[in-house]
Amino acid sequence: MANKAALISGITGQDGAYLAKLLLEKGYRVYGLLAHRSTKPFWRLSYLGIEEEVEFVDGDLMDLSSLGRAMAEVKPDEVYNLAAQSFVGVSWQQPILTANVTGLGVLHMLEAIRLNNPEIRFYQASSSEMFGLVQEPIQSETTPFYPRSPYGVAKLFGHWMTKNYRESYQMFACSGILFNHESPLRGLEFVTRKVTDAVARISLGKQSDLRLGNIDAKRDWGFAGDYVEAMWRMLQHDVADDYVVATGITSTVRQMCEIAFQHVGLSYEDYVVIDPKFYRPAEVDILLGDASKAKQQLQWTAKTSLETLIQMMVEADLERVRQEGKNVSGSIMR
Ligand code: NAP
Ligand code: G4F
């Protein structure tokens, strides 16, 4: 039997890169949907050494016809929809773009599959941000949603559309409600990477302080490399369903800063400056996930502690900042 083919939207992002690596290791033919950009952001795939192993197909979540063409060309067995405007902070500045890409884009994907081959297995990257103003202290698949950002509202639309296509057309459509997950490949706009990059720069004498917003916010942070395994497992299960993917431990941004600064022998209190510019119009104060369904049905658990994760990220950023001095092209890693 020929190897399975997988189409990944958002392949140039953090999760897309880790998922592509995992699927290649499992023998898949991996195709990445590539939206047209003025520059090709392949640094994550290069970092993992897989840029040459992935095939690319043009397509944008905003263009249903391009998705239909991509399905017809690739004939995937599995589609992972990871593409999104994924930064919560910017979703207040660009709410309509966020609604279109992060919300309506999911429906475009589902329609492209339904019209081409409804047998394709579909994964939707849903988010713990949908819990927002949390209605239960520990959030599971049965916790009611209360999104707090245009991003969260858009994700909720995609989540319900995924369920609706499963129930209306019996499509194998899964929604992974993933809590925050980070890695050395995280974008610099997100708080963990902003902190680990700053820690590296401060420790190497290239930055003097770090300006942050609400450092009392709590998140359930895991490692992206662990979480893509859960995505794959969902699509190998006998029935399509929705799953929370989380560590079951929540920590404040402040505690995360403490770990990062301590790793280079510094104290965060000496460098962190609170800047209201980074406060959000409506905050998600705390997220804490219960992934017992994923554990029971998919045999998935998170393996990486926050300490290990943040230390790994600081080490990667130290290496990058050191390289910047030697290699001008190092700046494209940021
Ligand atoms: P990311 O690094 O921001 O990657 C987003 C990807 O989407 C990029 O490859 C981007 O391409 C692509 N994209 C944006 N607009 C597009 C469009 N119109 N058409 C096609 N592609 C487009 O995000 P991530 O952290 O890997 O997250 C992956 C998915 O999981 C996202 O849907 C995110 O919302 C969701 N999620 C993430 C987390 C987390 O903690 N990381 C938690 C829950 C859910 P360019 O590089 O060309 O811009
Ligand atoms: O790192 P963040 O920007 O992640 P956020 O908003 O939780 O969203 C991430 O996780 C979601 C899953 O729950 C994903 F769906 C989403 O795509 C994304 O990956 O912010 C985390 C917390 C927030 O409470 C924020 O207010 O950190 C706080 N924070 C404090 N200072 C900051 C900053 N966040 C950022 N980005 N920058 C700051 O300076």
Image (cartoon, helix red, strand yellow):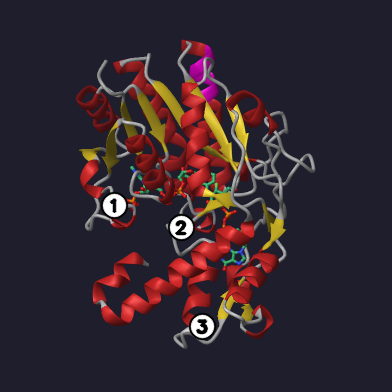
Which residue is at 31% across, 30% downward? 28
Of badges 1 and 3, the one in the foreground is 1
Label annotation for residue 202: 3
C-alpha span from label 1 to label 3: 29 Å
Residue 306 picture quarter: bottom right
Which residue is at 48% across, 47% downward? 225
Give residue 220's position: percent from left, percent from top.
66, 50
Of badges 2 and 1, the one in the foreground is 1
Whether 313 is drawn above or below 141: the answer is below
Whether 292 is drawn above or below 36: the answer is above
Q: Could one spot residue 128 in this view of the protein?
A: yes
Left or right: 255 as drawn, with respect to 333: right
Report the front residue among 3 and 69.
Answer: 3
Point out the stretch of residues depicted in magenta. 161-167
Label annotation for residue 186: 2
Mark 1 lies on residue: 49
Give residue 154's position: percent from left, percent from top.
52, 40
